[in-house]
Amino acid sequence: MPLIVHSDVTQPAWNSILSQPDSVLQDTCERVLSRLDVEFTERAVEISALLTDNAEQQMLNARYRQKDKPTNVLSFPVHEPHSIARIGPTAPPLMLGDMSFAFETVVEEARLKRIEPVAHFTHLIVHGVLHLLGFDHHNDSAAGEMEALEMEICKSLGLANPYEAH
């Protein structure tokens, strides 16, 4: 399955921690889809990523989640998870959805966790893609399932457990 990741870096500070944002996004998204055995036959899958700042992230969070504060990652799935399998292989590329990441929040959270910002960003990509695929953490059971997958995928990427204190 070909994966196409579109990125838009609107906050130049991202370049200070990511020399190749497209590569990090592509590799991490591929790892998540591979781990979950997501198969769309020969059909391409697309994901869009916005690397922005706290101000724009806050505006998106307020508009779409009614939470007037910045957040590290937002995910906007295009399809309901159960409907993805019903979309035929001859259709145009399947857009899974959009993700956006707030630079200042990601960097500050990494500092507080005492980890490299790119490691935290990579974990947030995993988190965001899982949301695009229908995983959530609104209750303890769903959160446990999602966090277990995140920990497993992060480990496969050479990252420490994102939910362990550092």
Image: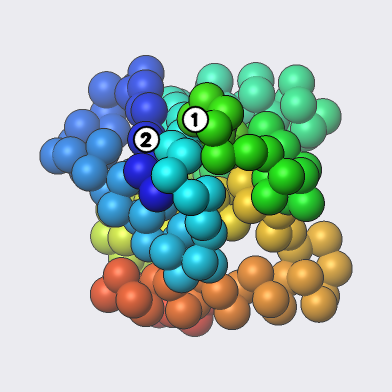
Instruction: Tell me where residue 21 appears, x and y as whole percent.
Output: 25, 38
User: Of marks 2 and 1, which one's residue comes earlier in the chain?
Assistant: 2
Q: Which residue is mark 1?
A: 93
* Residue 64 makes an appearance in the image: yes
Instruction: Tell me where residue 23 appears, x and y as whole percent.
Output: 22, 44
Residue at the spot x=59%, y=56% of the render? 130
The residue closer to the viewer here, 153 or 58, is 153
Instruction: Tell me where residue 137 appears, x and y as whole percent.
Output: 75, 63
Mark 2 and mark 1: span between their CA atoms?
A: 9 Å
Q: Secondary structure at mark 1?
A: loop
Amino acid, disc 1: Pro
Colour scheme of the rendered structure: rainbow
Q: Where is 39 relative to 83, above or below?
A: below
Quadrant location of the C terminus in the rendered image: bottom left
* Residue 131 makes an appearance in the image: no
Residue at the spot x=38%, y=62% of the render? 31
Residue at the spot x=69%, y=76% of the render? 145
61 lies left or right of 121: right
Amino acid, disc 2: Ile
Instruction: Tell me where residue 159 appears, x and y as whole percent.
Output: 32, 73
Q: Where is 63 relative to 133, above or below?
A: above
**Which quadrant of the figure has residue 18?**
top left
Q: Are marks 2 and 1 in contact (CB under 8 Å)?
A: yes
Q: How many marks?
A: 2
117 lies left or right of 94: left
Residue at the spot x=65%, y=20% of the render? 59
Q: Which residue is mark 2?
A: 4
